Amino acid sequence: MTIAVKCPSCGLMQMAGPLCKGCGAALGGPAGPVPLPVPSAPISPPPAPAAAGRLAGRSKTFLGILVAVVLVLAGWGLIGFGVFTFWDFRSDLDSGSKAYVDEAVQKITSSWNARELLDRATPELLQAAPPERVERFFHVFSHRLGPLRTYHGSRGTTQFFVSPQTGRIAAATYEAQATFENAEAVIQVRLLQRDGHWRIASFHVNSDALLR
């Protein structure tokens, strides 16, 4: 630390010494030593407003990106859950509709009993094909094809859709192969599910024996 003294005659502040450098008066030793200020370390000025704005903007951008990533991940999770649920529901529909078609086709074509079809028909099918008309067709099938000998199974797909008027409706389309006493035939069946129950919406029999 550097010591400064004040001259008692002229009041000049100066380094400690025997005589005043201003008036030559005797200093008489240090009187009222006053420490000279020591320069302190420079303090960094606060960031300029523009720099502070950039920092705030970067923070907001990072936060926005983080929120977007979280939302995207959550969205993919919901989509994955929806796809799994839809696939599980679709599998149940496929297995249920196929079992219904296989049983119905065999019972209907085993002896070409029109009542077996009418009991499984939708109201729309009954309106488009009254019982008398169905019985006439089945009489032709029985005469041209004969009774069922071998049922080869069915293949098809199931879809479902939502309507504001009717709600959720499931529909299935299948094609069954069968060998009858007189010829081969392909039976096309369309189903509708209402109130949890499958019904036959259309029933078509295709065979070369019916063209002769």
Image (cartoon, rainbow, N blue to C red):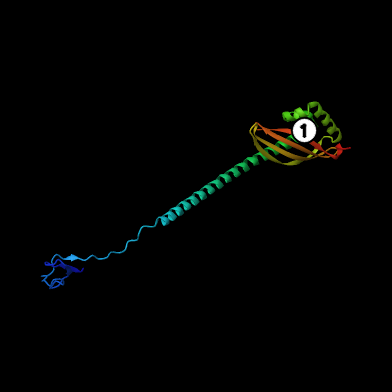
Residue at 74 percent of width and 34 percent of height = 104
Q: Give percent across and percent down for residue 188.
A: 77, 38
Q: Give percent across and percent down for residue 126.
A: 75, 28
Residue 27 location, quadrant: bottom left
Q: Give percent across and percent down for residue 9.
A: 11, 67
Q: Under tag 1, what secondary structure? A: helix
Left or right of 166 in this view: 52: left
Q: How many dots with numbers?
A: 1
**Rendered view: 64 above or below 111:** below
**Rendered view: 12 above or below 114:** below
Residue 211 location, quadrant: top right
Which residue type carries mark 1?
A: Ile
* Foreground pick, 121 / 10: 10
Residue topped by disc 1: 108
Disc 1 crowd, CA 10 A, few/some/many (<14, 14-19, 20+) = some
**Quadrant, the N terminus:** bottom left
Residue 200 location, quadrant: top right
* Foreground pick, 63 / 122: 63
Left or right of 83 in this view: 205: right
**Quadrant, the C terminus:** top right
Q: Give percent across and percent down for residue 162.
A: 64, 36
Residue at 66 percent of width and 37 percent of height = 161
* Foreground pick, 59 / 46: 46
Residue at 39 percent of width and 57 percent of height = 48
**Rendered view: 212 above or below 34:** above
